[in-house]
Image (cartoon, rainbow, N blue to C red):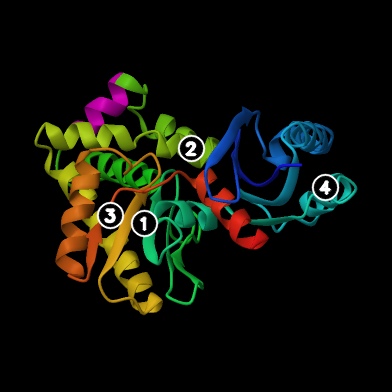
Amino acid sequence: MTEFAAGIDGGGTKTSIVLLDENGNMIARRTFGAFNLNSIGEEHFRSLLEIIVSWLNEHGKCGHLTIGAAGVSNPLMRKIADEVFIPADIPYDMVGDHVIALEGAHGGEPGLAVIAGTGSICFAKTMDGAIVRTGGWGHLLGDEGSAYALGRDAIKAVIAQMDCTGPETLLSDYLADERKLSSREEIIKYVYGGDKTALASLAVLVDRAYEEGDAAAAEILRDNAVKLARQIQSVHALSGLEKAPVAFLGGLIDKDSPFRRALLAAMKESDTGLYYRAALHPAVMGAAMLALKAMS
């Protein structure tokens, strides 16, 4: 019976799976629905794992399965996984989604990565395989250089104009025209009546205002880029690596944008021992690579 390693990248909207043979060659891949226990509930989460087991069994013997996802410290998630995978004789482990992202980004070798989406976090794999990190404190305590931070600072620039404590900014027009936010009451309701994704969605307006030459937007981008670059510099120091590659992950920086360019410039200025390199493999491949190592 063919034995293989399996990796799962369990996300909030989809679950990606990759199977590798003993030589590291991909033999199958598949996508299922959302993996997040909190969003889909216990019953659907259990059903998803059972479907995954059936699919794995179609391909032979799973020698090891590595699951990367957010919230893996949740005891209920591990309890359900034990109840599904142990009877199926599938050895498995669960790690944070940042671990598999880092493994895939540098092909299992040491290096750094920064994720900037709604939130932000920086992490590195050291020469001895340890994972070190900075950031990831959430929107109330950190998330510098995230979409949330850009959106929050855009709102601050607008209210500074309204209070006559800051310069005029195109962001005021954008908020009024596109989000119908022009009064104090509307802004307060929007900020305090929703969740952090509401503010994160405003990040695109900062990029647009910057492209139009808006000084407030330029300052927002520069300030957040410098703060995130400091986090990268810090995790570089913690890693003990000398010259090290950095991969950019997350919707805010995984493609060209004004903020990505500002971050690249700030990183180059703050730490000459770092250089940008595109991720070598996606996170799901990182999970499968870790599973293959566990088999050996």
Label placed on residue 101: none
State the residue position of label 1.
144
Quadrant in which the N terminus is drawn: top right
State the residue position of label 2.
197
> Would you place residue 230 above or below residue 174 in this image?
below
Residue 174 in magenta?
yes
Task: Check disc 2 and give the amino acid type.
Answer: Thr
Which one is nearer the viewer's eye here, 146 or 151?
A: 146
- The quarter of the picture where residue 164 lies is top left
Task: Check disc 4 and give the amino acid type.
Answer: Phe
Q: Residue at x 24, y 66 (%)?
A: 274
State the residue position of label 4.
85
Earlier-in-chain disc, 1 versus 3:
1
- The quarter of the picture where residue 33 lies is top right
Farthest residue, direction left: 213
Q: Residue at x 67, y 59 (%)?
A: 295
Counting other residues with Cα less than 10 Å from the Cα at mark 2, is it few (<14), some (14-19), or many (20 or more)? few
Main SS category, magenta section? helix
The reply to whether the C-beta atoms of the residues labelled 2 and 4 are less than 8 Å apart is: no
> Would you place residue 231 above or below residue 260 in this image?
below
Left or right: 251, with 161 as reference point: right
Task: Check disc 1 and give the amino acid type.
Answer: Glu
Earlier-in-chain disc, 2 versus 4:
4
Q: In what element is the residue under mark 1?
A: loop
Earlier-in-chain disc, 4 versus 3:
4
Please provide the residue range marked out in magenta: 169-177
